[in-house]
Amino acid sequence: MDNSSKIILDLCGGTGSWSKPYKDAGYDVRVITLPEYDLQDERTVEYCISLKPYGILFAVDCTVWANCGACWFKGRTSDEIFYYSKLLVKGLRIIYATNPSFYCIENPVGKMSQFLGVPNFKFDPFEFAGYSVNPESEAYTKRTYLWGRFTPPPKNPVVCLFKSNGNSPNAWYNKVGGKSQKTKERRSKTPSGFAKAFFQANQ
């Protein structure tokens, strides 16, 4: 099947790990992420709308949203909170304006539910690790919520080896801990097993 005319927007896509299965299948994937694209820039928003995407994947930066960072929230400036809130609104505007065949907004457990309501789907990476070529690397918990219009992918779990938090040396966070940008990106990267399952359910 020729999918080259179907545009997939990967908003705040980082490495493009969520949209990779679509790219591999020949879809026209556009990863809208810094530094090339700034979703805060109205020109980027208009560009995304002009593409009339077939599907939208939106992994909003969780800096001020996730519960795992709640201890730092009091230290956030009003400008910082507004920045990330505006980022969410910009993505929602693109979704509303283009009405794609499917769209999905992703974020860890946190404050986003106060804005988007009850999520359509919840999962931990280990529940999809059976689709991964390296299941053990994704056999961890990181409770994640999804909102949008999409077909929920069927789970294929493996035995969970690592917890997302806690003081145990076996905690997943301890495996990818640290404050560097590199470790932050590793923690936020979409698990390949989930990405594959989501693609198979939403084509």
Image (tube, grey):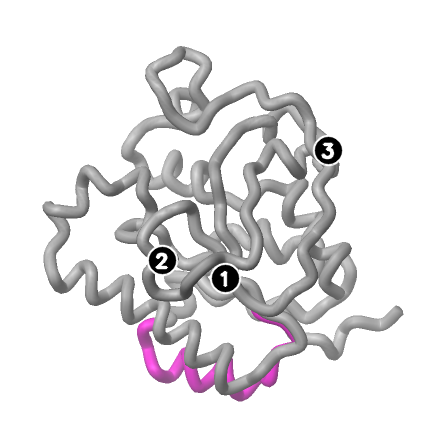
Q: CA distance from mark 3 to mark 1?
A: 23 Å
Q: Is residue 200 left or right of residue 165?
A: right
For mark 1, give the secondary structure. strand
For residue 27, above or below residue 172 = below
Q: Quadrant of the N terminus?
A: bottom right
**Label 2 amino acid?**
Met
Which mark is drawn over residue 105?
1
Q: Which quadrant of the structure image shows residue 37? A: bottom left
- Residue on which disc 3 sits: 130
Q: Which residue appears at 41% of the width and 65% of the height?
A: 116
For residue 187, above or below residue 92 = above
Q: CA distance from mark 2 to mark 1?
A: 10 Å
Is label 3 or label 2 in front?
2
For residue 27, above or below residue 49 = above
Task: Determine contact: label 2, label 1, CB under 8 Å.
Answer: yes
Q: Position of residue 112 (x, y in %)?
A: 36, 57
Q: Which residues are magenta?
A: 40-56
Which mark is drawn over residue 25?
none
- Residue on which disc 2 sits: 112
**Label 3 amino acid?**
Gly
Q: Counting other residues with Cα less than 10 Å from the Cα at mark 3, is it few (<14), some (14-19), or many (20 or more)?
A: many
**Label 1 amino acid?**
Ile
* Mark with earlier residue (3, 1): 1
Q: Which residue appears at 36% of the width and 67% of the height?
A: 88
Is residue 201 in the magenta section? Answer: no
Q: Quadrant of the C terminus?
A: bottom right
